[in-house]
Image (cartoon, rainbow, N blue to C red):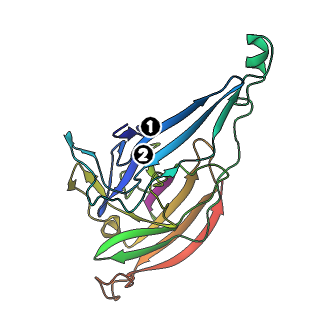
Amino acid sequence: MSYTETPHDAYQIYGDALWDEFTIPTAQAHYVEVYSDRTEIDRINFAAEDERTYTNGAWGYQSGYPFASAGMLAGPTWTVRLDGSTAEEVRANFDYTAAARDAVAPVQQGAPEHIVTNGADVLRVPAATDDEEVYGYDVRVRDAVTGAEALPIRAGAKVLADFQIAPRPSVLEIPLAIRNGRQVTLVSPASAGPSKSIDIRVDATGNISKTSTFDVVVDATAPHGDREDRRLVHGRRCSGI
């Protein structure tokens, strides 16, 4: 396939802002082997690089061939076995059923931090781990005093974990700004008030981690512009469900 889609519930990191976009920039496919007693299915990312093939209704192509990434398997092989002498027995012995669904929640690795990169607010998040695959991060930014939303991410929507990119990033730098198409319409939630409360949860396709909550406070005396210059200092941090 020349491009694939996520469920329409995720924002992607696109430059200096988040983009409410469901097509992903990698070509993917299923490689299927059929045997007398089983079918094996491999999920493959071809040239899994962060470069879009379809943007705002226009087609494009990944450049710089040969690609830096030759692609990757998206996870372990799915094996559907024909175990039984009748159709009913085969169905009863399937491994992939609702009752056998993986229920292990992902785990956050290390504390997120809020930094300023080239004058823009960024949430730096160590990549979470899961026994299968992390799908996305549920990020909510609120005014710490009033509780009002400071970043208008759609209800129920997440920030895609870039699981389709090879190599997978060990740290995600999530810009705290929303993009409307190619136009940034919200520069930063930090300007809306002196203090913010940020909640982060991790979603592994329906399995949700505990929520990490931490407060940040604007430090107007800190320098701006450099990647490591911080104008937000951490306050309270806690975890809960």
When the figure is inspected, residue 222 is found, relative to residue 183, above or below; the finding is: below
Magenta portion: prevailing SS class: strand
Magenta stretch: includes residue 143: no
Assess disc 1: are there few (<14), some (14-19) or many (≥20) residues with their C-alpha within 10 Å of its C-alpha.
few
**Distance from Cα at disc 1 to Cα at disc 2:** 7 Å
**Magenta span covers which residues?**
137-142
Asked if residue 100 lies left or right of residue 42, the reply is: right
Q: Amino acid at mark 2?
A: Ala
The residue at the point 66 percent across, 26 percent down is 35
When the figure is inspected, residue 189 is found, relative to residue 62, above or below; the finding is: below
- Given the current orientation, which residue lies at the most extreme front position? 36
Secondary structure beneath label 2: strand
Query: Is residue 97 among the parts visible in the rendering?
Result: no
When the figure is inspected, residue 103 is found, relative to residue 168, above or below; the finding is: above
The residue at the point 51 percent across, 78 percent down is 234
116 or 135, nearer to the observer: 135
The residue at the point 39 percent across, 82 percent down is 230
The residue at the point 27 percent across, 61 percent down is 64
Name the residue that disc number 2 marks.
Answer: 10
Q: x%, y% of residue 62?
A: 28, 53
Name the residue that disc number 1 marks.
Answer: 7
188 or 77, nearer to the observer: 77
Secondary structure beneath label 1: loop
Q: Amino acid at mark 1?
A: Pro
Q: x%, y% of residue 4?
A: 39, 39
The part of the image, by quadrant, that contains residue 177 is: bottom left
